[in-house]
Amino acid sequence: AQSVAQPEDQVNVAEGNPLTVKCTYSVSGNPYLFWYVQYPNRGLQFLLKYITGDNLVKGSYGFEAEFNKSQTSFHLKKPSALVSDSALYFCAVRDTNFGNEKLTFGTGTRLTIIP
Amino acid sequence: AAGVIQSPRHLIKEKRETATLKCYPIPRHDTVYWYQQGPGQDPQFLISFYEKMQSDKGSIPDRFSAQQFSDYHSELNMSSLELGDSALYFCASSLGLADPYEQYFGPGTRLTVT
């Protein structure tokens, strides 16, 4: 079974500072990893994904994530936080086997950027 | 660019009633997924369809059923509604074999059962 852990329910960062939202995963084989963001009363917006290749993945709105196979982690990062980055962030994992494409989400991390 | 369309956006039902949620995937997308997000919770996978056939099944109650039609839109039918069914229901679509990685989510249908 696949699973994702987001150890922090809440992360507070001052505007302009770098931010990190943590995610660790567990899958039986090679993972497909994703980050989604959810604004209040809105759907899930795709930020970035890791499928294969470079461990550092760049995505939307200046976000990036680093895949670390030995630590089974896929932390989301941004060099300089904006107030508009305040939202709920979900890490998700998908099995690489065809026919099993469902996403398993972490419990989410609420990111608050303090002006 | 066209996105996933879900209707209705909001739905209020009473206990024991039925509800039908509709999902219109991005044009040319052949795979549809349904997720349920309870208050303050992460989205939980319910069921998925690829080329009109059920491809995977998650924690979907027996009171719920779903199908994908010839135009690739999907409907989630919910019967004997319970208070605990109150949640945000997301539909997502993907290109299936062509791009099996990224799921594009709709805005969700907020179901309230009273």
Image: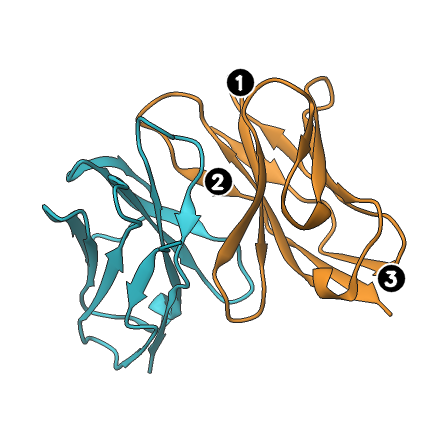
The secondary structure type at the circle numbered 1 is loop
- Report the residue marked by disc 2: A104
Badge 1 crowding class, 10 Å Cα cut-off, few under 14, some 14 to 19, many 20 or more, is: some
Q: Amino acid at mark 2?
A: Thr
Q: Amino acid at mark 3?
A: Glu
The residue at the point 45 percent across, 39 percent down is: A103
Q: Which mark is residue B11?
A: none
Q: Which mark is residue A15?
A: 3
The answer to whether dots 1 and 2 both sit on one chain is: yes
The answer to whether dots 2 and 3 both sit on one chain is: yes
Chain letter of the residue carrying label 1: A
- Report the residue marked by disc 1: A30
Q: Are marks 2 and 3 in contact (CB under 8 Å)?
A: no
Of mark 2 and mark 3, the one earlier in the sequence is 3
The secondary structure type at the circle numbered 3 is loop
The residue at the point 54 percent across, 25 percent down is: A51
Chain letter of the residue carrying label 3: A
Which color was chain B given? Answer: cyan
Lateral position of residue A15 relative to residue A89, left or right: right
Of mark 3 and mark 1, the one earlier in the sequence is 3
The residue at the point 18 percent across, 76 percent down is: B17
The answer to whether dots 3 and 1 both sit on one chain is: yes
Lateral position of residue A47 relative to residue A44, left or right: right
Q: Amino acid at mark 1?
A: Asn
Q: Real-space Cα distance between discs 2 and 3?
A: 31 Å
Badge 3 crowding class, 10 Å Cα cut-off, few under 14, some 14 to 19, many 20 or more, is: some
On the rendered image, what quadrant is the N terminus of chain B found in? bottom left
Q: Position of residue B43 (x, y in %)?
A: 47, 53
Q: Position of residue B4 (x, y in %)?
A: 34, 56
Which color was chain A given? Answer: orange
